[in-house]
Image (cartoon, rainbow, N blue to C red):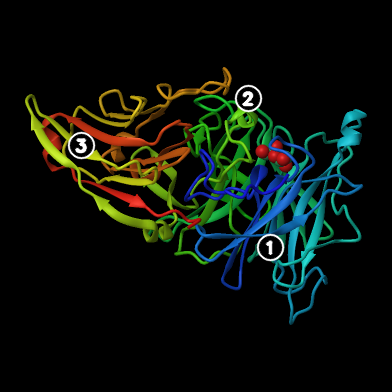
Amino acid sequence: MPESPSAYQEAFRPQFHFSPPKAWMNDPNGMVYHQGIYHLFYQYYPDDIIWGPMHWGHAVSKDLLHWKHRPIALEPDEKGYIFSGCAVVDVNNTSSLGSKENPPLVSIFTYHDEQRKQAEEKSFQSQALAFSLDQGKSWSKFEGNPVLLDENLIDFRDPKVFWHIEIEKWIMIIACGDHVRIYHSPNLIEWEYISSFGQGQGCHEGVWECPDLFELSLGESGRSKWVMLVSLVKGGPNGGSVTQYFIGEFDGFSFKNEGVEQEIKWLDFGTDNYAGVTWYNAPTEKGEKVFIGWMSNWDYAASTPTENWRGAMTLPRTLFLLDLDEGIYLGMKPFSSILNLRDKEIQLERTIKKNSVIEWIASIGHSPLLALLVKAWDKDFLKLELKFTSEGGKCLYVQLDPIKGELLLDRGKLENEGLGDKFTPLLKAPLLKGSQKEGLHIFLDTSSIEIFSCGGAINISAQIFPKENFYKIEVRGEGSGFEEVDISLFELKSIWK
Ligand code: FRU
């Protein structure tokens, strides 16, 4: 498949989200920060725009927004396809794959043996290593692969590994169908089973995939919690693939969920934020982690109307804990470098109508790239509606309804043909009472919208496929509390120009 000469200008090509140069992409993999560079690997099939034998594609960035493509890092071989996994910097050369002076970057991934799967053999997924001694430019597979097998597991994939400071061991969390398992290793090569988590916990409508486990401090309280992310193929609140999270304690051996067992916490209520995990080693403020997800859904990923490539990542996001009236939540906000993409500010014209209705209108000059901020407000109001309209009269709606306690995105008025029955046009999320006045942040790219609300605790990320760009945005507020609401709108720059 040749890279198209007009790559990055094709219809629906995201302009400030990562997408591959050509062909099919799904999960983000191997995210590691090393010597000032963020590495992003991804599930990649370079020969078609549908899923196939998986490779690891590779890109690098200094700000998580502007990316340079690198050659494919890992190709499938006789042991299998290269499924999802992670990468770490082995600073102490525990693996002996590098040296103390030149510590190796080590990726830990799943080999998926499609032939064994077709032959209905049980263990067709195993864990393996590859390493780089030139800061991620080239990768060699470890000769002793695989490093971890389990004869009894059908689903055994997507390892995420980190160094645990207190117990001085590598910890692996890995998805095993309806639970995750924790393993220990002194050297990334020999792994010992320690514990499991998951049966009877959270949502089990789909197979569990792509887990992550990390500690976050809770504001200035001096306390901290462990967060476990688990993606599941189906069962999302608005249908299809979705990511849930658990908050609890982890002593290096076992994870204890502090929430109610059956209560489900969704990372994102949108249908297009899947298989996301965090960067290893990224420099962050205390209490933060950097995250990216695949902006699609297994329900319709293969039918999205793009031509030379398929798949994009969400905006990179900062994760943090929020101590709210309703309990402890995981919050998300766009990674701060997005501010550097602000181009010109667009003025909104504000009119006060009768019956405490305020309207703002802006002509957005066909710019498909927008950041709209409705800043935090103090007073109660009845409803906030936003409408993006295209020349042909097609609309995208966002509504925040404090009375119903609901945030809603309606992408059903856009052309959605070809996406199939499982594409949910109307996406809903419950607002949290105590933090619903925290404002709304909305990011619109050529084929996606990302909405952050309730201080980042309740979010909707969704793909959209408008045939024409929007030319007008209208905001309508009902209720006297609106007088004070402050809105700003920015055009954003493309990352590919
Ligand atoms: C998640 C997933 C992973 C697997 C990979 C295969 O989207 O199904 O569990 O490793 O994609 O491409």
Report the residue at 78% width, 40% height from top: 156
Q: Earlier in the sequence, mark 1 or mark 3?
A: 1
Displayed quadrant of residue 309: top right
Q: Is residue 254 left or right of residue 329?
A: right
Q: Residue furthest front?
A: 5
Q: Which residue is tagged 3?
A: 361
Residue 492 on image: x %, y %: 37, 52
Displayed quadrant of residue 124: top right
Callout 3 crowding tier (Cα within 10 Å): few <14, some 14–19, many ≥20: some
Q: Amino acid at mark 3?
A: Ile
Callout 1 crowding tier (Cα within 10 Å): few <14, some 14–19, many ≥20: many
Residue at mark 2: C-beta within 8 A of ligand 1? no
**Front position among marks 3 and 2:** 3
Q: Are marks 1 and 2 in contact (CB under 8 Å)?
A: no
Q: Are marks 1 and 3 in contact (CB under 8 Å)?
A: no
Residue 408 on image: x %, y %: 37, 28
Q: Earlier in the sequence, mark 3 or mark 2?
A: 2
Q: Give the structural element (helix, strand or loop) at label 1.
A: strand
Q: Which residue is tagged 2?
A: 205
Label 1, label 3: how many angstroms apart (C-alpha)? 48 Å
Q: Which residue is tagged 1?
A: 88
Residue 16 on image: x %, y %: 47, 51
Label 1, label 2: how many angstroms apart (C-alpha)? 31 Å
Q: Amino acid at mark 1?
A: Val
Displayed quadrant of residue 372: top left
Callout 2 crowding tier (Cα within 10 Å): few <14, some 14–19, many ≥20: some
Q: Quadrant of ligand 1?
A: top right
Q: Residue furthest top?
A: 421
Q: Amino acid at mark 2?
A: Glu
